[in-house]
Amino acid sequence: MSDRHFAYWPKGLPRHMTIPETDLFYNVDVSAKRFPDKPYLVFYDTTISFKEFKDEAERIAGFLEHECGVKKGDRVLLFMQNSPQFVLAYYGILRANAVVVPINPMNLTNELRHYVSDSGAVTAIIAQDLYAQMKPLLGEGLQHILVAAYSDYLKRPTDLKVPEFIAAPRLPIADPGVTLWSDALAKELQPGPVTVGPDDLCVMPYTSGTTGNPKGCMHTHRSAMSTLVAGIQWFGIQQDSTFMAVLPFFHVTGMQGAMSGPLFCGITVVLLPRWDREAAAQCVQRYGVTGWTAIPTMIIDFLMNPNLDKYDLSTITRMSGGGAAMPEAIAQKLLDRGITYVEGYGLSETIAPTHINPPDRAKKQCLGIPIFDVEARVVDPQTFTELPPGEVGEIVVNGPQVFLGYWNNPQGTADAFVDIGGKRFFRTGDLGRTDEDGYFFMVDRLKRMINASGYKVWPAEVEALMYQHPAIQEACVISAKDAHRGETVKCLVSLKEAYRGKVTEQEIVDWASRNMAAYKYPRIVEFIETLPKSATGKVQWRALQEREQERTT
């Protein structure tokens, strides 16, 4: 890798970052001692101090250990929206020396079944509005479910618009193996000693690939610590900043940048469980929000708010994000308000950023430059020879945040890495290029992946779910252009002979919406007589994708 980018390295910032040799829960201890009465979380005007947070997280850990039998290295599912309970559960699991398995709350029972069986988890912490999706898995591997009501943390009156699912009162659930969050806290059980270290497993976000089911990315306390500290130090953020959390915590960008990073630093976080542009503007003004991370679709919606000018947004000094390129016109609108939007790049396998733009010299629609101790290259995907500026190849990275490998999937792990000059590089599957300054730019995807409003949708996973429909003989998922989402999911379907003329395209769409997460189900279904195949019988998805692009250009 060249050192051209060092010419634009943030001023005064060392190029090496020493990663703390501690487990993540130690950050809770430190902030609780340093800032005991300072609010860590703000949830519709209800605050939770760092001291209160530590107390409740330890009680959750005690419950997991004493009542659920959770022990070191066990995986525990975490299935809920952004909320105080998500953060408390996350750190409660860590305090119990266990491993967090965060799950997108849009997932339905058929999808959840894989997470349970693959991770080997027997315990889950979930929100009550999602209980119906998880309940069928009790006895199918799951033995214990801890159910939380978001409304338990609405302890003060608020004039903010509270979504119905947040305001819903706590429901009594008497099913065997189920405990209510409030009852678990009331037991006041204390956990045993911390026995994990920096190289023990910490969190296992799942990511889908080009084939098969989602795969668990094994991250240690060390790899997770590297990016939560790096994000804070890259931007020179201090403890008296205030963040707003609008990206989901189950996703590594929100998890590291808006949850764990602020906890490390002692920063107050204003939580929004679901995007609401009016509530976001109100919170910026009310709490003096200084920074937040958001995907472009959120910021576009935020700036389109006709009431925006009535709010004081002057405290915002930084907006950052990734997942999709920020349109230049929107970036300029932010600049007109004195706000620079700083883009970055990372994956579940790197638990957020490997690249971030220098705040004082950010380039538009750019991934940025490799951050602390990261070596990144653009290489020929066949020979792995590094390519010169301007030439397109696969982005590969080596750094402290790179995961150990995929859980229980040695072949997937072997395929994900390549040895270059004695160093182990992770193959991102993304095609990019560098410029003369050493900045990285995304060009395309080597893997089949659809980016719908910042959510990664993997066609192979959707296809596997589509084949559960009795009428479908063959299915091929491709990307289609969408004015709002950027890309959306389209499925080309060949029907079984007995069903032809008896089922409609819309009926297939409706079925898919009931059987998979909202962000991933095909919004468009097109019937096709037969899918084109290669001489070896493989569906030629690329040809179908190219045909779709030609039709819409």
Image: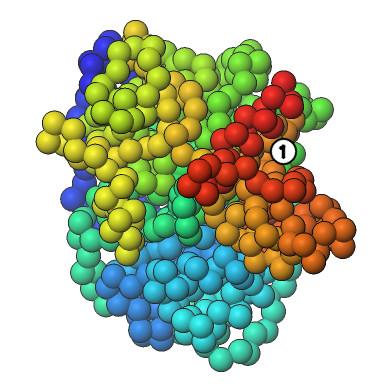
* Res 450 → quadrant: top right
Outermost residue to the front: 535
510 vs 148, left or right, is right
Whether residue 97 appears in this view of the structure is yes
For the residue pair 20 and 186, the one nearer the viewer reads as 20
Amino acid type shown at disc 1: Arg
* Res 481 → quadrant: top right
* Res 368 → quadrant: top left
Q: Residue at horizontal 13%, vertical 31%?
A: 421
User: Measured from the top left, where is residue 529 in percent x and y?
Assistant: 74, 48
User: Measured from the top left, where is residue 196 in percent x and y?
Assistant: 22, 65
Q: Is residue 222 above or below residue 445?
A: below
Residue assigned mark 1: 277
Q: Residue at horizontal 48%, vertical 67%?
A: 115
453 vs 41, left or right, is right
For the residue pair 388 and 332, the one nearer the viewer reads as 388
Q: Residue at horizontal 81%, vertical 64%?
A: 499
Where the C terminus falls, by quadrant? top right
Q: Residue at horizontal 56%, vertical 91%?
A: 176
For the residue pair 4 and 548, the one nearer the viewer reads as 548
For the residue pair 465 and 541, the one nearer the viewer reads as 541
199 vs 263, left or right, is left
User: Measured from the top left, where is residue 219 in percent x and y?
Assistant: 31, 54
Whether residue 275 appears in this view of the structure is no
Where the N terminus falls, by quadrant? top left
430 vs 164, left or right, is left
